[in-house]
Image (spheres, helix red, strand yellow):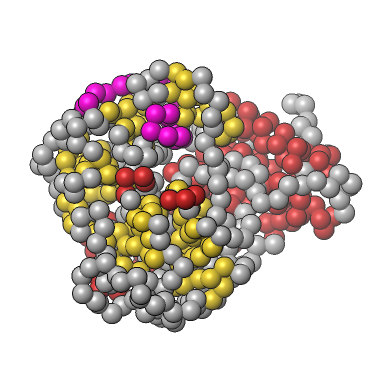
Amino acid sequence: MTETRLRELLHDLAEDAPPAALRRVEAAWHTAHRPRPRRGLVVAAAVGVATVATSVVVVQAPWRDDPVRPPGVTTATPTPTGSPRPTESSGPPDSRYHGVPVWWAPAARDDATLPELETGIPPLIDLSPSQDVLRPGERALAVYQVAGADERLLRLVVLTVDGDTRELPAGRIEPNRDEAGNSARLLHLSPTGDFLAISQPGSLEVYDVASGDWTSIDTPDWVAEGARWIDDHTLWVPDSLEDDGSGSTYAPDGRPLESAVRPGNPSLAVSPGDTSYSGPVAGPEAALAGSYFLQGPVRGGPYTNPEGVIARSGDATSILAVGAAGRSKVCCPVVGWLDAETVGFTTNGRILAWRVGSDRVYRVAQTTGVDPRTEFVTADWAAQALR
Amino acid sequence: MSADQDSFVAWATTCQARLLRVATLLTGDHHRAEDLVQEALVKVAARWQRLHDGSPEAYARRVIVRDNISWWRRQRREVVGPYDVEVTAPAPAPERHLLLRQALGRLTPRQRAVIVLRYYEDLTEAQAADVMGVSVGTVKSQTHLALRRLRERAPELAELLAEEPPP
């Protein structure tokens, strides 16, 4: 009987799993019953950009709170504010992963004392309520979604290329949920920040940042969260979230396009078991950067299966291992390339920058104006406007 | 420890290995499976007073399945395994594990979930639909799609993956 044999094979596969670590049972109880306000502080600090939803970061794997400092980290010494000099030297990699050099990021407790790096991103990004309203003609660098604990949208805050933060009135926007009622991706900022597409259960609401006009594009139910900008004038919507192979393309004003262009699916995986959770984001001259769960083993740090920012520039690929103490799961989504050598990523409410192919990590910006007990933040960035 | 904590620890100690096996089949990644189980245990612990007289394991299983699907959706990632299966000769038994594991890696999280729930957990279509938070029709269609994709990706296993006519 075929189903019986499939069942037997699945049971055989399941038996291959290593035994569970029993000590985690009590850790689960303590995590669930620790004082909520303090937990919320950690949670909100861990909220990053891109598509990290609150449920992903609410529970920080307690067994990863390893106080051991990764060896070889050299980024904890503050230096005067300003762009690092190009002559700064980098230490050798802490290890190699399938031949790719790996440097371990500093522990989260050292983030506040990293040297600053001046970029086009303001050092403080104020997400508090009562912002001035975004005016037509202002250009968007990023858009932040601030939601309540019940996932209700509280406000949309646009970070402009001039470094100001503005509120985008979002009365027409509802929380986006998937077919099963789970929170789903909301924001899709176009590569240069000229258009913002917002997923709704049966439509995409597209905001023209230059004109201040909204356009509604009807979509089949539940697929809008899979929308992607192919370029600033082409928005692609898959026919099904289960299959990226077919879809429809639209102009930002809602006109259907006949384009046969499909979104690319580049990968920076070093090992077949590496899995992406953010990006890859394109940089200058075909450079790519993305955030991955690394299958490992990765040596030279406190864990053998960390998360990592993988960057490829020219023929060189390098990894910043970021799964160290004080960072939650899905800790470090990539923001984009800040210049030809530097990738920005978020962690614990900060934007950090990594000079690819080196051990140098810098502090770029920090978000403020969010109540960590009741508000949660996600964001999307205009990758091409960053550099 | 309080009585609640004692009873939670006793329950979780008993069932966590089962939950981990389910999560590993769902994800194909033992480390992420551990994270899913841990998150489910935390959610059960937070609701223990309401759950402990009911079906905490069913609740935990529901959390694991839905969190896994939601996680992948939020990351906008299509699950595509790393290997193309090109071998066409019948596979000996030890290789079937690898082939099935690779073929499962080609499924979307939802398709993988229906396979695990229907053929590993032995849930009915209605029970699987409840766990996944979808309709019975969706479970049927996803099961059909999943079996078809498994057959395409692992033709050596076709004999195991034939759909049987309904009784």
Judge by depth and name the residue closer to the eye, A84 or A167.
A84
Image coordinates for residue A140, horizontal then vertical, percent? 25, 40
Image coordinates for residue B80, horizontal then vertical, percent? 62, 45
| The magenta stretch spans residue A214 | yes
From what the image shows, is residue B166 above or below residue B157? above
Image coordinates for residue B106, horizontal then vertical, percent? 66, 44
Judge by depth and name the residue closer to the eye, A176 or B46.
A176
Judge by depth and name the residue closer to the eye, A26 or B153.
B153
Image coordinates for residue A328, horizontal then vertical, percent? 39, 62
Q: In the rendered image, is residue B122 in sight?
A: no
Residue located at (39% from left, 77% from top): A89
Residue located at (45% from left, 18% from top): A256
Residue located at (57% from left, 56% from top): A269
| The magenta stretch spans residue A270 | no
Q: Which residues are magenta?
A: A211-235
Judge by depth and name the residue closer to the eye, A56 or B12.
A56
Residue located at (54% from left, 32% from top): A262
Please give left or right for residue A104 compared with residue A46 in the image. right
Q: Quadrant of residue A80?
A: bottom left
